[in-house]
Image (tube, rainbow, N blue to C red):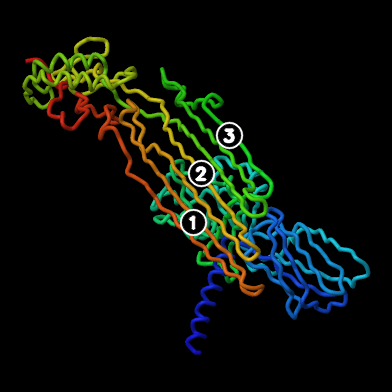
Amino acid sequence: MGCSRLVFLVVAIAVLSAEALGQGETTSAIVGQATDATGAVVPAATVTVTSHDTGSKRSAKTDGAGRFNFPQLKPGAYTVRVEAQGFEPQEADNVFSGLGQKQTVNFILRVARSNQTVEVSSEAPIINPSNANTSTTLDAPALEDLPNPGGDSTYPLQFASGALINTAGSGNDFVGGTNGYGNVEFNGLPALSNGYIVDGLETNDPLTNLNSGLSTNLVLGLNSISEVTINTLSYSVDQGRYGASQVNYVTKSGTNQFHGDLYELWNGSILNAADYFTNATPGNRKPRSNVNHFGGSLGGPIIHDKLFFFFDSEWVRIALPIVTPTTVSTPAFRQYVLRQLPLGGTDSVTGSTYAAAPELVPFYQKMFSLYGKTSGVPLAVLGCPFNSDGTLASGATPSGNGCANRQSISHSSDDHEQAQTARIDYNINTNNTAWFRFQADTGVQAAYTDPINPLFNSISPQPLYSFAAGYTHVFSQNLVAHYPKQGRFFARSSPTASSPASPGSTESSGTICGESILERERSWRGSRCRPE
């Protein structure tokens, strides 16, 4: 007997723990009390809650104190109906149960005089004394109305009390950066003290503990979010762990009505002016820039009142303008190198002698062909034997300006990212419900964009896949269990590049005027050679 009680106690604790965890992250609750006109409690009254979205119903009896409790409800709008023998039925329509919160609905029943129903319509109270959280909740319409550039999921958090948004100096700041890092701070606590939870799955970056973005440095998927709740300062017993805030997101679900949206936001260089420095450089042009954010969603019933689907697709294409100062060799210098290779020569700076190397001519021809635009401001380089006007440079160690040009290259860094979210909800029966959500966030980030030739660009693929599932079983009106399951995995790879080096150089010291592009060819520096 003692062993059986111990097993039952362990099982009960596990069930209650699952209930507490789930309610704080993916579900909500509706509670209340039924009394008569004199204030006396009404026990054994039948209370039924009905979802506006899916038509699912749950019923319970009020206890000896007239109280009722519906935990583990999917966040959303409900109709609450109370029926008791000898009293007129009452309904409270449009009762909104927020994510991770308890919504209180109290009823005062009147003695029945005829066959009639009293309908009560009211908005949720501004202050809910039953909710211990200091929280801010934004539903889907509010999220859609926010002017959110880039659709970043962290952006709505700035509307919570005590929030300081964009605490990083730039989107690329990382741990140890001089400008700080993170998306948002609360009440002066660091950004790594926030917890981000989507459908019960903690999404903090495992390395930085931040709500980090991927390829575009944006946290995509906001269009798939039904509701977000930001809890700060104080927590109810089913939440906590984080010192600054706990941010709970829950994804949209299908309903008995088909619903969806399509959108596109675009901004490009054609609509923007060039900056002062671009215009001040002769021959320069405004770099291409493009931001294209588009997507859509669709949800609805598969089986009315039973099985529902939701799918969201979001795409971002970003081309960031980059202006890079660089040094390139002139056409005259390249011809000089190709003529000098078969002859050999003596370095005009060090006096070193280099043997003839005609076999290198094809290599240097291919290497020089990688250059595109070669115009620019002539740059004096130690060891260059001629000037830009074609005259020979004077001096025992010449420093002509005909070997290299300094130029400012306008180009773009292309990033792209796409997030696909799919969710299935299944109302198995009155006492059992289940759901499953999968998300794939893939894309490519430009790790390095070469100013001379795109052959030397480096890219970084950054895919992330996640799933979450939940099963709720109602044992009785006093015992409800929620079984969550979540996981995610990264498939990141190291940046890939076409070559370990670039033919362009941001250095202008000129001590190696031969533009020794590849380390393996540094043994011959033709620009510092003179004919024997």
- Residue 393 visible from this viewpoint: no
Q: CA distance from mark 1 to mark 3?
A: 29 Å
Spot occupied by residue 503 in the image (x, y as percentages of width and height): 26, 27
State how far apart marks 2 and 1 are (Cα): 27 Å
- Closer to viewer: mark 2 or mark 1: 2
Q: Quadrant of residue 295?
A: top right
Above or below — where is 238 with respect to 351? below
Q: Is residue 352 left or right of residue 390?
A: left
Q: Looking at the image, do the residues carrying marks 2 and 1 touch, with CB atoms under 8 Å apart?
A: no
Q: Which mark is residue 191?
A: 1
Asked if 392 appears above or below 222 in the picture, the reply is above
| Name of the residue lying farthest toward the bottom | 1
Q: Amino acid at mark 2?
A: Gln
Mark 3 or 2, nearer chain start: 3
Q: Secondary structure at mark 1?
A: helix
Q: Residue at x 44, y 45 (%)?
A: 214
Depth check: give the residue in front, 24 or 278: 24
Q: Residue at 42% x, 32% y: name it.
A: 413
Foreground: disc 1 or disc 3: 3
Give the foreground label among 3 and 2: 2
Q: Which residue is mark 2?
A: 420
- Determine if residue 17 is in view: yes
Query: Residue 504 appears at what percent x and percent y?
Result: 29, 27
Up-down: is 192 above or below 361? below
- Crowding around mark 1 (Cα neighbors within 10 Å: few <14, some 14 to 19, many 20+) is many
Which numbered tag is attached to residue 265?
A: 3
User: Residue placed at 29% from the left, 32% from the top?
Assistant: 498
**Badge 2: few (under 14), some or many (20 or more) residues near its Cα, within 10 Å?**
many
Q: Amino acid at mark 1?
A: Ala
